[in-house]
Image: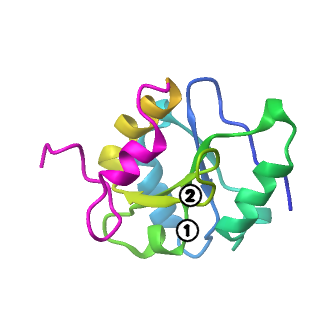
Amino acid sequence: MLPLPQPDDLHSLVLRIDFTDETAWTKLQVAVGADHATFVSDPRYADVTIQDLVDADAAAIDDHKLTYLFVADATTMADDEHCILAVDLYDEPGRAFRLPPRWYADVSANLCIANLDFQDFANASDETGTYRGLGEE
């Protein structure tokens, strides 16, 4: 497995693992905004599993370990909302929830500065496993 790419400082990694829809990928990038993410679209990550990502992070040296990442998978690309998969790599490696791009900046910023933990967002997800804000909607 390839090592995980490193996000820019105070940004979160959005890793593309599905390459079936270039238009959907572009729409996702626009919806998230370049100011809030480090986007990686490298075909070498095509179709990796969440476990592969967890394993890659576990194998990394401490300075290159991530605590979480966002994944643009087949569901992200096919979904009308382009819900991104957030994956925990630290407390409960592999635990995941989805979020529409409109919530990305909020989740990413809070995780980047450790204002809230991954589990805070995962626990606030609805019955479909999708985070839609902390009671605002």
Q: Mark 1 and mark 2 in contact? Answer it, CB < 8 Å.
A: yes
Residue 49 higher or lower than 41, as above or below:
below
Residue 27: in magenta span? no
Which residue sits furthest left?
Answer: 137
Residue 8 higher or lower than 130, as above or below:
above
Residue 130: in magenta span? yes
Which residue is rendered at x = 70% and y = 67% of the image?
Answer: 51
Q: Is residue 130 left or right of residue 134?
A: right
Label 1: which secondary element: loop
Query: How many numbered callouts?
Result: 2
Mark 1–mark 2 Cα distance, whole angstroms, equals: 6 Å
The image quarter in which residue 67 lies: top right
Residue 46 higher or lower than 53, as above or below:
below
Q: Residues within 10 Å of mark 1 (few under 14, many from 20)?
A: many
In the rendered image, residue 91, in percent from the top left (x then y), is placed at 59, 46
Give the residue type at disc 1.
Asp
Which residue is rendered at x = 68% and y = 40% of the image?
Answer: 66
Q: Nearer the viewer, residue 93 or 113?
A: 93
> Which segment is the magenta one?
114-137
Q: Identify the main secondary structure in magenta.
A: loop
Asked whether the viewer can see residue 102, the reply is yes
Q: Nearer the viewer, residue 73 or 69?
A: 69
Residue 127 higher or lower than 55, as above or below:
below
The image quarter in which residue 106 lies: top left
In the rendered image, residue 137, in percent from the top left (x then y), is placed at 12, 49
Which residue is rendered at x = 76% and y = 49% of the image?
Answer: 57
Q: Residues within 10 Å of mark 2 (few under 14, many from 20)?
A: many
Q: Which residue is mark 1?
A: 73
User: What label does residue 71 carry, if any?
Assistant: 2
In the rendered image, residue 38, in percent from the top left (x then y), is placed at 60, 39
Q: Is residue 62 left or right of residue 20?
A: right
